[in-house]
Image (cartoon, helix red, strand yellow):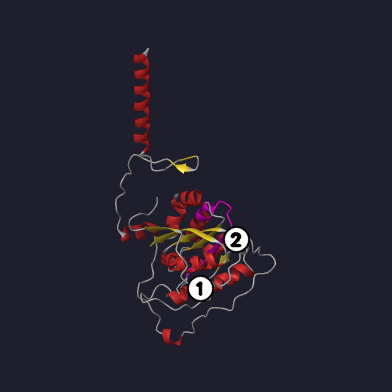
Amino acid sequence: MNRLYLVWASICFILACSALYLYSYIPSTYLLADQEIKKLFEIEKPVEQVSEIIEVAEIDTIPTYVIPADTAQMVYSAIPEPILPDSSVDDSTQHRILLIGDSEAGGMKNVLNDYCQSNGHKLVATVEWASATSLNFAKSDTISKIIRRYRPSFVFVLFGLNEVLAKDYSTRKNLAKSFHKRLNGLPYAWIGPTNWGYDYVVTDAFQAVADSAAFFSSKHLILPKATDGRHPSLPGYRIWMGNVANWLQESSRWKIRMMPPTRFGYPKKYKAIVLNAADYRGY
């Protein structure tokens, strides 16, 4: 009898190990009691060149050091006077906030963190997917896994800088639709990319998909640039966030309290998830 138990235990052990071994070769992952089942090992993904990813995505990217000739004559936007939240904003609501986006989200995350902590919200995680486009966000299940893991009550979306020169409206719109489904009904603020005049279809495509009152177009803003000539500077991000904060309290579909922070430089307690489409395209 003891031998039978030993044989049965050995068979169960071998089957369990075999199942875990085979599971490691499956691209997707699964949850058990809201916890991701760990694999015995991860299959290494081949590193792809940025040029190959751009070719697959059919994306035109802004040249890195493009600075308009009339920069000196630009009238930069300023941080607006704060708009007090109206009666429809529940000041007691404390949201768990997730920020999803490309490198511009990486520049916005610390400014957003200051706003969140000053207004009683918690920035639980940020996704900074450098060089990513709507193709990555639409086709990858990475975003869905992150949403399930961090369980936000409100999502900030900020990407599109890497495709403002794209001219295929229908393609961008369809990709935006696929990404929108990944939000799974969560309240959100979808922020259009900065463009400094370089934007053919991407803002319009995103705005057509998002809830009409949940999309903030950044086309009207002229923000101070960083030294790379492509992203906003820190003052630029603060001006940008100030405008978004006013919109969130005044006319957004899902209004939340976002008064200017009492100070800058709050502790960074969020989980920062940093990816690069050159190494990980997500699909």
What crowding class fits label 1: few (fewer than 14 Cα within 10 Å), some (14-19), or many (20 or more)? few
Relative to 243, 53 lies left or right: left
Question: What residue range appears in magenta?
Answer: 178-193
> What residue is at 62 percent from the left and 68 percent from the top?
249
Q: Is residue 280 visible?
A: yes
> What residue is at 34 percent from the left and 35 percent from the top?
21
Q: Quadrant of residue 128?
A: bottom left
Q: Quadrant of residue 260?
A: bottom right
Magenta span contains residue 117: no
Residue 263 has which mark? Answer: 1
**Disc 1 vs disc 2: which is toward the camera?**
1
Q: Secondary structure under badge 2?
A: loop
The residue at which mark 2 appears reads as 211
> What residue is at 47 percent from the left and 77 percent from the top?
223
Relative to 141, 7 lies left or right: left
Q: Earlier in the sequence, mark 1 or mark 2?
A: 2
Q: Quadrant of residue 28?
A: top left
Residue 107 has which mark? Answer: none
Determine the residue located farthest toward the top in the rendered image.
Answer: 1
What crowding class fits label 2: few (fewer than 14 Cα within 10 Å), some (14-19), or many (20 or more)? some
Relative to 178, 42 lies left or right: left
Residue type, mark 2 in image: Asp
Percent coordinates x, y for residue 25 in the rendering:
35, 39
Residue type, mark 1 in image: Arg
Confirm or deny contact between disc 1 and disc 2 (CB under 8 A): no
Front residue of 83/73: it is 83
* Cα distance between the residues tagged 1 and 2: 32 Å
Percent coordinates x, y for residue 36 in the rendering:
44, 43
